[in-house]
Amino acid sequence: MRRLSHQIYLTVVGALLLFAVLISAAWMLSPARGEERDLAAGYAATVAELLPPADRPVHELQEAVARLADRLRLDIAVFAADGTRLASAGRRLPAPHQGLAESHWVRPRGHGLAVALRLPDGRFFVARSLHAPARTHRFFLTSLALLAAAVALGAWPLSRRLTGRLERLRQRVEDLGGGKLEARAPIEGRDEVAALARSFNSAAERIEALVMAQRRMLAFASHELRSPLARLSVALEMMAADPALKARARRDLAELDGLIGELLEASRLEAQGARAEAVDLLALVAEEAARSGADVEGVPVVLRGDARLLRRLVRNLLENARRHGAGSAVEARVESDGPGARLSVADRGPGVPESERERIFEPFYRPPGSAESGEGYGLGLALVRQIARAHGGDARCLAREGGGTMFEVLLG
C-alpha cells in the first residue's frame, strides 16, 4: 500500500519540477522581446562590418568566415536570404527558418542552440560556440538537479508533518477499537486534521462514558439480583412443608441465576473479546454432549479460540435442542471447513418456521408458545451468534431434511 506521505511528497516535487521545466521551455521558445531584437540588430551590424559585402567573391567570404571561426572559436555559416549556404566553418549548422525575416534561434542536429543573425543586406549569419552545447546542457541539468534537491528537502518535512498527524490519529483509532477506551488523539494545529482529532476525542469520551455506565449498571444489577437470590436460597433450605413448591422455587431461582450469567457473559464478550488458544472442538463438543446425552460424530479440528466461550456456545445449542426437540435424539457433528470448523446440532422436533429463523437470534426474543412453557429467556441463541462472530464466523438456523431443526455454526 502506498503511504500518503509519499504520495503527497512526490506530487509536490513533481509539480514544482514540471513547473520549472515548462518555465525554461517557455523562456527558450518565446519570441524575442524588444530589447533582445535591438541587441541582435547591433550584433548583426557588427558582424556585417567584419564580413565582405554581398557582391564580393564567395572565396573572400569563406576566408573571412574561417578567420572569425578560428579567432572566436565558433561554428559559423552564412546563408543567402533564400537559405542557400554561402560559406561555413566548423560543424555543420542548419539554415535559418524560412519565413522568419528577423534574427532568431535555430536548433542544429544533436544538441544546443545556434543564433541566426539577419544582416542588413539580407544574409543570415548563423553561429554556435564550440563548447556551448555541453556547457548549456551541463548548466541546465545541474540547475535542474539543484532545484530538485531543494524542492525535495523542503517538501519532505511538509508532507511528513501532515501525514504524521494522520498516522498518530489512526493509531488512536486502532487503540480505541482494540478496547483501550482511554485512547485520545493529540490535537496539533488548527486545520482539518486538528478538527478531526477533536471530533475523535469527543466521540471516544462519549463511547467510554456509555461503556462504563453499562458496566456499572450490569455490576450493580448482578449484585442486587444475586443478593436476594442467595437469601431466597437459604430460606428455601429451611422450608420443608411443601416439596413441590420448594422444587418450583428452586427452578425459578436457577432460571434467574442463569439469566444473570448469560447477561454477564454477553457483557464480558463485548468488552474483552475472545481469547486465542488452541481448542480441540470435537473433544469439547464430546464433553458437553456426554452431560446432556447427545450423540456426537465428526473429525478432530483444532482451531484458535476461547475455550470457555466455545464451551458456552456448544452448551447453549445442546440445551436448546433438548428443550425444543420434543424428546427426540440430539445429534452434534464437527467438520473441517477450510482453515476453520463447522459445527451442526440437530433434532427431530417440530422445527422453526422460516419467518422465525433469524429472529430467534435476537436477545430476549422467544418464539410464540415458548414463553408459556416457562423455559428459556431468549439469550442463549443470541449469545451463540455473538460468540461465533467473535471467532470470525456466524450461526444460522436451518430446516432439517426429514423434519426437525439444525443449527449450523461456522468458526474461524
Image (cartoon, grey):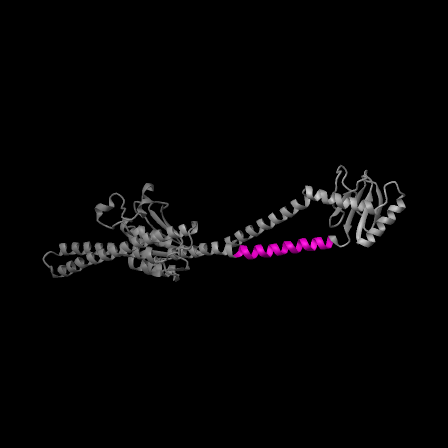
Q: Identify the residue at image location x=52%, y=51%.
A: 8
Q: Residue furthest bottom?
A: 278
- Where does residue 89 sit, x and y in percent of width and height? 83, 50
Q: Nearer the viewer, residue 406 or 50?
A: 50
| Residue extent of the magenta highlight | 133-156
The reply to whether residue 3 is in sight is no
Q: Main secondary structure of the magenta part?
A: helix
Q: As displayed, is residue 180 above or below residue 84? A: below
- Where does residue 384 sit, x and y in percent of width and height? 33, 53
- Where does residue 160 sit, x and y in percent of width and height? 50, 56
Residue 83 left/right relative to 175 = right
Residue 45 picture quarter: top right
Residue 142 picture quarter: bottom right
Q: Nearer the viewer, residue 57 or 188?
A: 57
- Where does residue 34 sit, x and y in percent of width and height? 68, 41
Q: As displayed, is residue 133 above or below residue 116? A: below
The reply to whether residue 77 is in sight is yes
Q: Quadrant of the C terminus?
A: bottom left
Q: Identify the residue at image location x=82%, y=54%.
A: 71
Q: Residue furthest top?
A: 99
Residue 80 left/right relative to 22 = right
Residue 65 left/right relative to 191 = right
